Image (spheres, rainbow, N blue to C red):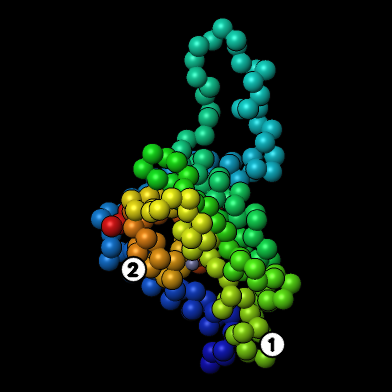
């Protein structure tokens, strides 16, 4: 028998939320596609240790007119920005970042998971579970997800037709927000109930 806060029950809730988000995206889908995301972990690692030699200008031949090889491709660049944004999160269990990009590859919104503006991190709970079973003693009623913050923090009037790069598969609430905001593509790195592997593909979902 499942108890209210059993791990099995929590996994069921997570799976249900992920399935709801998938359903929302599928109903709005034009096409699904996946491709190899070669630099996800390299980009994430480079945020901590940017010493792989690629950025050392002293190694370049000053007479060579060729562009530098090994530069970040757009997808890796924006996903790295999402990972960097996630590092701002004070959530002790999960840090999520999102980066909205317009049709011209210009960043128009960045966000991470956190409490609403002005709500003190020291006064609201970051716990995932409550010993008394009171949901108000957990983070869930209070946290604004990364996608929500990226949309609300946008630096233009609209994100219609934009892409969102997010470090984790969106929940059903954020899926609804992104659809209503006119987002046309989601690129995510990690499924909610399936942590990304080093060779995991970058999954994208396009919808209108
Ligand atoms: Zn969400």
Residue at figure coordinates x 40%, y 53% from the top left: 157
Instruction: Determine the CA span between mark 1 and mark 2.
Output: 33 Å
Which residue sits furthest front? 157
Pinpoint residue 75: horizontal percent, then vertical percent: 46, 42
As drawn, is 146 to the left or to the right of 130? Answer: left
**35 or 187, which lies in front?**
187
Tell me: residue 78, above or below residue 147: above
Which residue sits furthest left? 30
Q: Which residue is mark 1?
A: 131
Pinpoint residue 162: horizontal percent, then vertical percent: 38, 50
Pinpoint residue 126: horizontal percent, then vertical percent: 67, 73
Residue at figure coordinates x 55%, y 68% from the top left: 144
Mark 1 or 2, nearer chain start: 2
Residue at figure coordinates x 48%, y 79% from the top left: 12
Q: Which residue is mark 2?
A: 24
Q: Secondary structure at mark 1?
A: loop
Residue 24 visible in the displayed image: yes
**152 or 1, which lies in front?**
152
**169 or 97, which lies in front?**
97
């Amino acid at each position: 028998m499942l108890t209210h806060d059993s791990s099995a029950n929590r996994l069921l809730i997570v799976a249900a939320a992920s399935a709801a988000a998938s359903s929302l995206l599928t109903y709005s889908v034009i096409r699904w596609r996946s491709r190899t995301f070669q630099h996800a972990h390299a980009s994430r690692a480079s945020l901590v240790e940017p010493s792989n030699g690629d950025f050392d200008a002293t190694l370049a031949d000053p007479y060579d007119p060729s562009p530098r090889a090994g530069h970040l491709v757009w997808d890796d660049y924006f996903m790295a920005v999402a990972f960097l944004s996630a590092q701002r999160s004070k959530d002790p269990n999960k840090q999520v970042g999102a980066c909205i990009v317009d049709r011209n590859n210009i960043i128009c919104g960045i966000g991470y998971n956190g409490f609403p503006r002005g709500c003190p991190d020291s006064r609201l709970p970051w716990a995932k579970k409550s010993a008394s079973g009171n949901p108000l003693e957990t983070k869930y009623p209070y946290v604004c997800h990364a996608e929500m913050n990226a949309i609300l923090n946008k630096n233009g009037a609209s994100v219609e037709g934009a892409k969102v790069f997010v470090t984790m598969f969106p929940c059903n609430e954020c899926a609804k927000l992104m659809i209503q905001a006119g987002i046309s593509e989601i690129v995510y790195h990690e499924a909610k109930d399936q942590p990304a592997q080093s060779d995991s593909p970058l999954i994208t979902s396009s919808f209108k």
